[in-house]
Image (spheres, grey):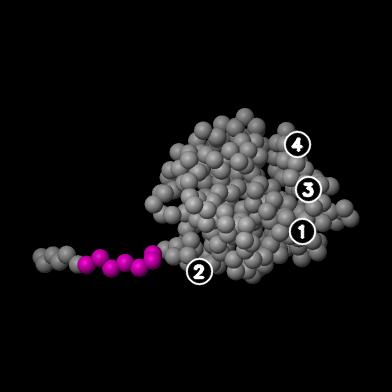
Amino acid sequence: MRYDKIATVTDAGLGSRARIGMLVLKTDQTVEFEAAQIIARVDGVTLHHARLYNDFEITRDTLLAMKPLIPDASRLLPVEWGFKSIGYACTSGAMVIGEGEVERLVRTVHPRTAVTNPLTGGLAGLTALGCRRIAVLTPYVRAVNDGLVSALQARGLQVTAFASYEEPDDNQVGRISVAEIVRASVALARHDDVDGVFVSCTSLRTIDAIPAIEAASGKPATSSNHGMIWHMLRQAGIGEPIGGLGRLFEHGITPTMHRAAAAE
């Protein structure tokens, strides 16, 4: 047998424009799939994810139990890969633990990386869309819903309509149909005092729902997955519009988002 040692020839590799990372809950069936659908439309960007343990039952206590696990999950995304943005993919978890605390925990491992989550990304998306009086659709139990309303109102939004499936089992949430999400969202959007819709929870399938909601209601919409992925791309400096994903993805990058991605 002839054996040759050959020279290593490299190029920029995958993610030549940006690598983005995501911390995904053990129980989440949806966010990886929806994120991959979007990232596949953007040249030179790769998505990498790590799983984070959580309970199938979503309560304030089970959400808080994730807090000490965030740094170890973050270490499963290699620092050497130079992530431009990392998203903690849990809306209610970010609300209960605190958006700033989630960012701090991730940045103990990735100090040079911009950090977001579905609540932060959703709020940024609603702001970009000019929404102030919003309708909210969730699958959460009442105690989590009350906290979400308080968090949204503390950020200057008026929650003028609200509906929830009050389904505590994340396995069931992932099976709520896209058609049902569209139906419920459009019903909420019909209220005169609503100027935008937010669908909360990364387990809900919303990437195909958002354009349908906007087409049927005539009002802008975003969701946990939709808003977070948009925000991650913008944090990473990816500013071009992406068609077929609703109004939010028509928005370009802002200087504030670019500075956050380039910090340090």
Marked residue nearer the N-terminal end (4 or 2): 2
Residue depicted at 69% across the width and 62% down the height: 248
- The residue type indicated by label 4 comes to Asp
Q: Which mark is residue 43?
A: 2
The answer to whether any part of residue 114 appears in the image is yes
Disc 2 residue crowd, few under 14, some 14–19, many 20+, Cα 10 Å? few
Marked residue nearer the N-terminal end (2 or 1): 2
Query: x, y (%) of residue 143?
Result: 73, 33
Q: Nearer the viewer, residue 73 or 199?
A: 73
Q: Which residues are magenta?
A: 7-13
Relative to 9, is 157 above or below? above
Q: Which mark is residue 146?
A: 4
Task: From the image, tell me which residue sits under label 1.
Answer: 130
Q: Main secondary structure of the magenta part?
A: loop
Q: Nearer the viewer, residue 208 or 260?
A: 260
Query: x, y (%) of residue 124?
Result: 68, 53
Disc 1 residue crowd, few under 14, some 14–19, many 20+, Cα 10 Å? few
What whole-number distance in Å separates the C-alpha atoms at marks 1 and 3? 11 Å
The answer to whether any part of residue 176 appears in the image is no
- The residue type indicated by label 1 comes to Gly
Residue 29 lies in the magenta stretch = no
What whole-number distance in Å separates the C-alpha atoms at marks 2 and 3? 34 Å
What whole-number distance in Å separates the C-alpha atoms at marks 4 and 1? 24 Å
Disc 4 residue crowd, few under 14, some 14–19, many 20+, Cα 10 Å? few
Marked residue nearer the N-terminal end (3 or 4): 4
Task: From the image, tell me which residue sits under label 3.
Answer: 157
